[in-house]
Amino acid sequence: MFALPAVFAIAAAVAACGPSAAKAPPGPGPVTGGTKQVAPLQFKDDAKAPAQALILGTDLKGGSTVLPLASAENKVSVDSMWVRTGGGPAVGGSSPVALVTSPNPDGVVRVGIYEEVAGSLGPQWRAGVWLASFVSSTIINKDLTDFKFTAEAGGHVDGASASGLMTAGYLASMVGAKVDPTVTMTGIINPDGTIGPVGGIPQKFIGSIEKGKKRLGYPIGMRYAQDANSGERVDLVQLAKDRGAEAVEVADVYAAVELLTGKRLPRPVPVTEDQMILEDDVVKALEARYLHWQGMLAQEWTRLLELEKAGRLPAGLVSLAMTAQAEGTAAEKLKNQGMAASAYHRVVRAWVYAAGATATSDILELAQAGDLIGARTKLHEFEGLAVTTDASLRAIAELKPATMGGHLQMLSAFQTAISGWGFHVFSGEFLGPQTRATFLELEKLPRAALADRAVGDQVVAVTAPTVLAIARAVANSAMALEAIEIEGQKSINYLCSLPNVKRLATSFQSAAGSNLAYFDSLIVAELAKAFGVTPEQAKIRLAGFEPDYLVAMMAGSVAGMGGLPDQLKKEWGEDSISWGLFSLAASELSFFRTSMLISKWYSLGVQNDPISGRPVSVEHEKAFFNMLTWAEQRARENARAALVATGEIPIQARIRYQQARVLREGDLADKLAALEGFWAASAYAQTAVMLARN
């Protein structure tokens, strides 16, 4: 029922692009222009000045560092490592890429990609340029619209393994640092500035050394990488040494810049773990909502036990029931350990699976009893529960926050509600009609045949995904409204700038759109080819079992979509703060979900269980664990910047951080969720900084 199509096992094994971060040779020293103390919300002039950036919280006393920037167009050249497979032994090398940045007074997104032949630079490479542009801006507390970015490369190139290199190259261009022509690196850039794993590194190293490279960076945790020809694990440090070069482990973009230029970018000092703790009133609010969902889960669980006792719980639903039980047990354990944030989310997930199992079972019983009209009616009744998604979005829009904390609260609630709306629309427009069409086909069978086990399995296979999507819609809509209560807090009396909200939304929308195109070219195209369907049909199939893709696809489309989004835009007004925050929430949500998808399917090489669909292994395990460690640190570094910028660490960042810290101790699925949680914590902190600077 939830089996993973074979194409994904193939696609996940495609060579990826890797992480970076460690020591580089001593250089001329840090790139700084002095330090200064800034008061919360009083740093606009320093942060927005075109010839400088302000890196917040670079010392324990709250000091910030002024970073001089190039005041005119500046060009650097980097050499992108590549590996070519097919038609013989794999061969590696490196090719020049020209990167140019310049101040952008227009306040609109300007990212240009130049190629010698139309289509010679593939969608994955182009997406890497977009991501490099976006991350290099945010690393120095600037907006994507503050600069014009161009990238130029020759020949036919694709893949995103140069995105870490290009991010560091753009930063070198921004600060006017010279790139050492004997140095290069490989690795995919993540949204928080950490660098993820890639494939084909031994061949890349050999080819690059033959072209004169002396120092080569590789993702942290990937010292031993697989040779694309022999299949053996190769020690990259020894490989480089044997050829008169040096291999350098790189963990994040800061280390990448130091590797390329010998210069050290200033970075925030991480806050302590104690500073990420939640206030007592937040914990009490989480505990109250936990008890509410626990009661709802108990009702569903009683029904499941009755079905199991009567022997009426079909085998196809046992996995849902077991997942519900596991999530509920974990939730209660976390609750007893005082981990309220994680317990709350676990118990909601338990309810989703339990409700999905009981509703599917109810529909199945009617169908196998010959009452197919009753089965369709029961499905329609369950679908009716999801109408709360529309009401949730409107309720959030009615909030009239008087503080920045209130605006972040709206942003968070909107993101959860948009997820719920996405599940609602998908179940209503795609999954539901397919389920009802199956019931119409079943009406052609004799009544007695409906009781056959094979028919029952068919009903479960088409009904369970629909019902689960509805349950997720209901849960997310409810959680969006509960976020208003849980995340309510006092904050500095400061309102967001609507033009700045729009600029941020545009930046995230551009980056998310590029990410989505990248993922579609990498996975959806392969899926369409494997199943002999159109790309649009492949997207629907993928969204049916990959919730992150469904949410990313729906959230990334709201700005120009008809239906409810267009209706809300007209109701609220395109120039209202409600629509501005709604647009920002959707674009930011899409960006981080697509980033997670790329990391799972491309960079990390995640393999899923063919029955449950849950991840069971990761190709680059050591690199993944290092990514988690550095993502956790980046979350606390960004929290420091937010603390200096606004006077507080956003509650949204701390809630996601606390959830992630618990999840990283779980199984692989939990660890992947932890990575996304740390990224989300960084995102909320960075958003607070960007809103505060205006």
Image: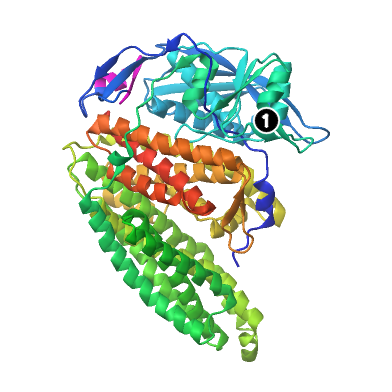
* Range covered by the magenta-colored residues: 45-58
Residue 510 in view here = no
- What is the x, y in percent for residue 562? 42, 52
The colour scheme is: rainbow
- Tag 1 secondary structure: helix
Quadrant in which residue 217 is drawn: top right
The residue lying toward the viewer, choosing from 648 and 331, is 331
Q: Is residue 164 left or right of residue 683?
A: right
Q: Callout 1: few (<14), some (14-19), or many (20+) C-alpha neighbours within 10 Å?
A: many
- Number of marks drawn: 1
- What is the x, y in percent for residue 474? 38, 64
Quadrant in which residue 116 is drawn: top right
The residue lying toward the viewer, choosing from 693 and 562, is 693
Residue 323 in view here = yes
- What is the x, y in percent for residue 139? 41, 27
Q: Quadrant of the C terminus?
A: top left
Name which residue type carries label 1.
Ile
The residue lying toward the viewer, choosing from 66 and 227, is 227
Q: Is residue 517 left or right of residue 400?
A: right
- What is the x, y in percent for residue 9? 67, 52
Residue at the far top in the pictured view: 28
Residue at position x 46%, y 76% from top? Answer: 358
In this view, 89 is above or below 680: above
In this view, 531 is above or below 583: below
Residue at position x 40%, y 29% from top? Answer: 138
Residue at the far bottom in the pictured view: 448
Q: Which residue is mark 1?
A: 201
Quadrant in which residue 441 is drawn: bottom right
226 falls in the magenta region: no
In this view, 345 is above or below 310: above
Q: Quadrant of the N terminus?
A: bottom right
